[in-house]
Image (tube, coloured by chain):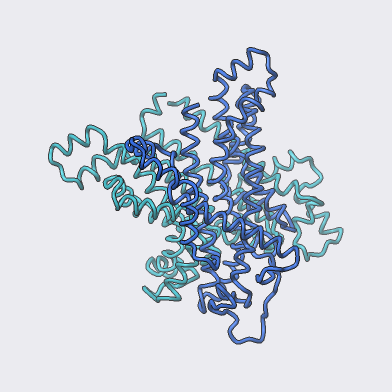
Amino acid sequence: MGKMIGQRVVRLIATLLAVTFLTFLLTALLPGDPVNAILPPDAPRDQATVDRIRAEFNLDDPLLVRYGSWLANAVTGDLGKSYITDQQVTEAIKQRIPITFELTALAAFFALLLAVPVGILGAYREGRFADKSSSAMVQVGLSVPPFIVGIFLIWLFTVKTSFLGLPSTGWNRITTDGLWENLRTAVLPAFALSLAPLAYFSRLLRSDMVGTLKEDFVLSARAKGLKNRYILGRHALRPSSLSLVTIVGIQLGILLSGTVVIEQIFALPGLGSRLLNAIYQRDIVMIQGITVFIATMYVLINTAVDFIYLAIDPRIRKR
Amino acid sequence: MSTTDPSVQELELTDETPAAPRKMSRQSPKPRRTAKAAKRPGKKMPITAKLALFWLSLVVFGAIYAKFDNLLGQRLPLQDPRYQGNLFGTASRTETPSTAHFLGTDVLSRDSFARLVHGGWVSLIVAMSAVTFGVVFGGLIGTFAGYVKGRTERVIMALIDVILAFPALVLLLAMVSIFQVRSLTVISLVIGLLAIPAYTRIARANTLALANREFVHAAQAIGTKRFTIMFREIFPNVLPTLLAYALVNAAAIIVIEGTLSFLGLSVQLPEPTWGNMINEGRSEIRQTILPVLWPSLALTLTVLSLNQVGDWLQGRAEVRSAAL
């Protein structure tokens, strides 16, 4: 067990090093002088500015040395400063990450909330109409890109009907506007984001549960005369949800990057829209910083999933 | 989509090939065997996959025909996709469907149908080239890694794992942002590069299993060169699995390209893509949803179709490798 955790930790560190190096390479391998990439396109390029930037980014040092000092700064929370907005990258991330996190968590919550009953229903009525129709809907859910879902949600809830008076764009902060106002702006984007994981989760739960329902202990529970609801919810759900837990973790990471598009559609001031802005402005330092941050989060979440899996499934621990 | 009723053509399509043998077997003295055969996974093509193939062929044919017609000087009654519309002047620029504009016009009073048909071209090219890239390079690298084993394999797979450790969309955005000019070639190359890791993994896993088969041992015994074994014995047997995955992967790639186009980070603007059509139609969503609806439908149907055919093929590939 201890050896296994040690291995995972070593692998985590190696992956993080590689991921940060690759992100660093993105900017280091830019064609032409890196100064051109760092400076905004319309900034003056006099010798003094160029020299200052060369000194600040140690551009005269070899690549590996530059990576080393950049990484050392990044670990202490200094990802550099944008030359276009004059903002510290860490500052921008701190400002915008709560929105992205809330969106991700809410989307995962919606997806689970709906996927569990849909998955159970599909397994319980295997091969019947309810199973077939929900499987068909899952297929569609897996095929509709989230940005299309987002646009049609806006159209449906703010143009066609003014049901609940949901706003189409914008964000109310929990701290200033209260929970209700905050949720009013969060519910549509979170739902748009949740459709794809919802489809994954319910498909996975259904296929696992179909297997579980064929087990002997389900038969004996039925023989005891337990109610269907009790068998499905208590006996069968837990052993069927092992792989679901892993997938939820992996999907959290994917959702985190999926917010980029959703935030753009709903005009939410999250991390994703900041990344897009940086890309539109060719703000290389900002792109690099946010990419490294999201990638690191992604790797950390995936490692955490590994550990959770170790904790809940004793069979893996023994190996 | 086209002027002909789709349901009529579907019937024609199903009548042509698979239905004929089924009718014959129904008259044969042993109907039980056919029922059994139909139940075996992947044996018979389901109706959804047939519909999917029909839709995909419409999109591919439409895109190629429209592209070449446009290059050869506009013989089709389709509007030129580079037509920039009229920004000023007319009161209502967005028209509802009529005989002149089959699916109506978009916010710049450009014909939606023409742009829809042309828009398939970018999706088609990006998907085809990225998938080819993945199958060829990913397949070869994976086969190589799986066959030589040892340190080389570990290094290759570690590199692959690092690329897979990134959230794909963010890595893609970061890579795309480097390029000042985003041509079709650049987009295809970048997406193709990111498609390689998945194929490498599949090819390696299959190679590991294949390397212990009798025909490989036989080839080794008669002293065949290692590279010949890789290319002649193993790679052809890895290929069906890769191709089955390729269709599902193509669906994902079309979504990715659509997302990039939607964000304005794919090919430059006058060129219609489904993604940028959706983005342009979004601005006047309060007037009409139609300019958003058509490309959304086309994109979703295409992805759905690729998934259907891909799932069916993957089921077949599993059956095949089990029988091998």
Nearer to us in this view, A180 or A229 = A229
Q: Is residue A168 left or right of residue B79?
A: left
The answer to whether B144 is drawn above or below residue A89 in the figure is above
- Tally the numbered discs: 0
- The quadrant of the image that shows the N terminus of chain B is bottom right
Q: In the picture provided, is B101 more to the left or to the right than A231? A: right
State the image coordinates of residue B307 (x, y, percent, origin top left): 49, 49
Q: Position of residue B186 (x, y in %)?
A: 71, 52
Q: Residue at x 62, y 60 (%)?
A: B62
Q: Which chain is cyan?
A: A
From the viewer's perspective, tell me whether residue A37 is left or right of residue B106: right
Question: Does B70 sit above or below residue A213?
Answer: below
| Residue that appears at 51% across and 32% down | A8
Residue A273 location, quadrant: bottom right
Q: Nearer the viewer, residue B316 or B307?
A: B316
- As drawn, which residue projects farthest toward the left? A225
When the figure is inspected, residue A299 is found, relative to residue B78, above or below; the finding is above
Which chain is represented by blue in the image?
Answer: B
Q: Position of residue B270 (x, y in %)?
A: 69, 67
